Image (cartoon, helix red, strand yellow):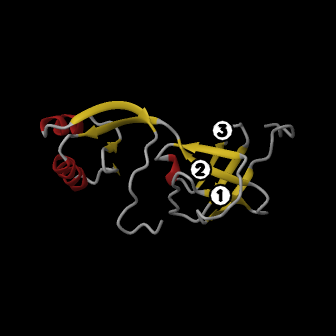
Amino acid sequence: MSNDSSAPTAIVLTHRLHHHHHSASPLVLSLTADERTRSRHHFVTDDGTPIYLQLPRGTALQEGDLLSSTADDVLVKIAAKPEPVLTVTSDDSINLLRAAYHLGNRHVSLEITPTYLRLAPDSVLLGMLTQLGLQVVEQVAPFCPQGGAYSHH
């Protein structure tokens, strides 16, 4: 096994900064919802810079989070990477609430907004939602599910 000294060294990101931190971030790291739950992992920023997340275990990143390097000399902004999703809408807000209730009973990761619900693709849930009279569209879009009841973000 050879040691390739020309390979760039990964920037180690160890801190999540507060959202009100005012600093322009030249690096963007686009991650899927699942990838944003990995606290120790190698990734590559959107411009190809290798990074390594070394965050406290259990850290769940959200779109817009800023991460800093060990030396606080590099900032990376987290973006929600578009991924396959089901987007659920209804002309009746009560139907959206019912859908959220049923999906919550199944412990489904769910993005909740006033006008739509969004979840990972699942044929069984697609059938249930359609049967409940909701409009369901398969899309590729950013997915930002709610944190759990005990999340502190």
Judged left or right of residue 144, residue 102 is left
Give x and y (percent) for residue 31.
Answer: 55, 44
Q: Which residue is mark 3?
A: 46
Within-10-Å neighbours for mark 2: few <14, some 14–19, many 20+:
many
Give x and y (percent) for residue 24.
Answer: 71, 53
Label 1–label 3 contact, CB within 8 A: no
Residue toward you, 41 or 123: 123
Within-10-Å neighbours for mark 3: few <14, some 14–19, many 20+:
few
Judged left or right of residue 62, residue 88 is left
Q: Amino acid at mark 3?
A: Asp
Against 58, residue 110 (above or below) is: above
The quadrant where residue 132 appears: top left
- The kind of secondary structure element at disc 1 is strand
**Residue 128 marker:** none
Spatial distance from mark 2 to mark 1, Cα to Cα?
Answer: 8 Å
Q: Which residue is mark 1?
A: 67
Q: Which residue is mark 2?
A: 78
Against 6, residue 104 (above or below) is: below
**Who's the residue at 81% across and 38% down the image?**
7
Image quadrant where one finds the N terminus: top right
Sequence-wise, the earlier of marks 1 and 3 is: 3
Residue toward you, 85 or 40: 85
Within-10-Å neighbours for mark 1: few <14, some 14–19, many 20+:
many
Give x and y (percent) for residue 34.
Answer: 46, 47
Label 2–label 1 contact, CB within 8 A: yes
Q: Amino acid at mark 2?
A: Ile
Give x and y (percent) for residue 6.
Answer: 86, 37
Q: Amino acid at mark 1?
A: Leu
- The kind of secondary structure element at disc 2 is strand
The residue lying furthest to the front in this view is: 91
Sequence-wise, the earlier of marks 2 and 1 is: 1
